[in-house]
Image (cartoon, coloured by chain):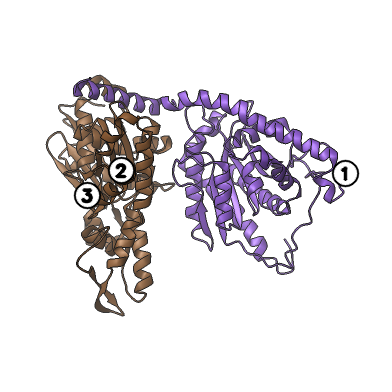
Chain colours: A purple, B brown
Amino acid sequence: MASIDDTKAQLLRGVVQDNIDVLQGVRTRPLIRRKGRLQLWFWSGSLAIVIALSTLSSYLISRGSAPARSGATVSPVAAVLNIDFTPESEVPLSHPRPINREAIPLAIKTIVIDPGHGGEPGAISESGVTEKEITLDVALRLRRLLENGPFEVLLTRESDRRLSLDQRVAFANEHKADLFLSIHVNWMEPHTVRALETYYVGPTDDPATLKLASRENKDSAYALSDYKQILEKIYVDARRDESRVFAKTIQSRLFRSLKPKNPLLQNRGVKTAPFVVLIGTQMPAVLVEISSLSNEGDVELLTKMDYRENIALALLEGIRGYANGFKAFDGKGR
Amino acid sequence: MEETNETLCLGIDLGTSRSSVSASNGERHVIDSYVGWPVDMVARKLVKKPVMVGREALDNRPMLDLRRPLERGVMKDGSEKDQEAVQEILRHLISLAGIKQKGKNKARVRAVVGVPAEAFRVSRQNLRNALEGIADSVMLVSEPFAVAYGLEALLHALVIDIGAGTADFCVMQGRYPTDEDQKTLPNAGDSIDEQLMKLVRERHPDAQFSIHMIREWKENSSFVGERKERLMVSVPIKGKETQVDITSEMRAACESILPPVSETMIALLTKVEPEFQSKVRNNVIIAGGSSLISGLPEALSKALDELGGGRATVVHDPVFAGSDGSLAIARDASSSDWEKLSL
């Protein structure tokens, strides 16, 4: 058995190494070990989930089962919408009629903010900054800002806690949230790209979006038996129009706010994707990729408090903009 | 850095509510983690100082722009003023320890600072940046780990450090703890304050009280479980000093942290290798300001019954357990280690 002095010496080596890792921006050793296992599981498991999702959706589309309700012509899905650079393309599927706000007065009271990942790190920059810490930091800032307003704000996690995607969905649904905002940080190829994207629920055949969805859906905890219901929600959920409006507001405010501080930032616009957190939630829901950890320029900005505060402020503006649309709709529309 | 004559080691527990320092010259001090700047020229003339730290700042708060710059055990967000406030607290702690910070013979300062077990890398980097110009070399360690090191509870122990901002857990298994051995919860002293404030306001809507009064009541009389005497406090109601009973509110507020703390404790214990679980269960050590809640160790020991029994005890000196542990690390680290971590 090791003497207490030997144990102390070993612990001190750990302390010093841990601090050197922080200084050098190297991720901690336990995370490296875990990453290898996770990647293998993730690529074999979650990619299969998304492929299955896409294949099943194509199958259902070709049979006309899900979209048959509206009688819409079904074609391969091109769902990438870009609000600033390209005209918004229609999702060529069953297109539910939007909520008539004149008929149903609505108000935004409860907002659920979902800081992506936790427990597991999510994306990790070359310099060791993890997605989980950025998303939580921005979410906490956003909560602080929102709490000055009339909203009740709830976070799916307030610490580095692992939550499955269905737990996040259940949290929002159980609290009867009026809005759901999931915050993530992207990892993009090539690494020179600095881009913002906001997603709402819907199908996609864009390979990059599929890859992203597979990454973000990896802790879904849904079973194969849930897929039919999931697919139906993707195609026929009437929340989609509201989610699209919400996504556009978020994306435009975010881009407008960050572009001056990050001149190389690209606006990848609003897109649809089958993210589990967007499928299962019962309220207007979006997933925003606030930056990219694959680009070290973005990472450097993300490590600055001011920049993260700016992101939170832009998200606040987006939420307020969307919420004010409801308030302002006294027969005038938005 | 210029040549120095003396090397001093410091252990610092930078807390959301209180911060303590233990120095190798034998000095030990604890301060309230408040910083205030005079709001205008009149205030400046009255307080006669450009900045006030600790209890002095709290006592003069009507004249000050008062900051409590730490949140959940790390520097608050966004505001440069809060960063400046953290630096003022650190400078103040160092000056209390009798360390000369200026001039030819200024001491070389090696500081070990405790942070929450799951403090983010960004938060750690911010803290390191704040220490530039204040210390020469810095190590950041998780708070419960520092407590364990100071107590030499290095094997088969679970340390729970419950402060104001966070409750931090660390299982010690004779090796440097991994992410899986540590946990941080936001349910700690501040969440008790918020709960108590809400409950007292609900029961006595006309009573006038501040968060500072709530904290004082909690620090004097917090408890979980049964209490023989009623807990009465004095508050103005419509301007008239009145005695009000807050026994049930205090109990409910303090007990609000029990479920998350117990659940996390049990979750960490069940991850320990089976042959050592019983040893760790019987060596649960509670530290931090909130460990002074009366009845807390008994309540956590009772929660351990679910796993077949165990024992939770409070450290001998909860206020300084963190900074003493950090000082022990600072003293034991070699000069070559310190050189690697120069600022």
Contact (CB < 8 A) between labels 3 and 2?
no
B204, above or below A292, in the image: below
- Mark closer to the chain start, 3 or 2: 3
Q: Nearer the viewer, residue A257 or A323?
A: A323
Q: For mark 2, what is the residue? A: B87
- Could you give the CA–CA distance between mark 1 and mark 3, rounded to whole angstroms? 71 Å
CA separation, marks 2 and 1?
64 Å
Residue A185 picture location, percent across and down: 57, 37
Residue A180 is left or right of residue A304, and the answer is right
For the residue carrying disc 2, how many other residues have a C-alpha within 10 Å: few (<14), some (14-19), or many (20+)? Answer: many
Image disc number at residue A73:
1
Q: Residue at x 32, y 45 (%)?
A: B86
Callout 2–callout 1 Cβ contact below 8 Å: no
The one of B313 and A255 positioned closer to us in this rendering: B313
The residue wearing badge 3 is B31
Discs 1 and 3 carry the same chain letter: no
Rendered location of residue B82, percent (x, y) = 36, 48
Q: Residue at x 47, y 43 (%)?
A: A137
> On residue B335, which mark appears?
none
Residue drawn at x 64%, y 53% as measured from the top left: A282
- Local packing at callout 1 (Cα closer than 10 Å; few below 14, some 14-19, many 20+) is few
Tell whether label 3 touches label 1 (CB within 8 Å).
Answer: no
Q: Is A91 on the left-hand or right-hand side of A269?
A: right
Q: Give the structural element (helix, strand or loop) at label 2.
A: helix
Seen from the viewer's position, the closer of residues A34 and B277 is: B277
Percent of width and height locating residue A275: 65, 41
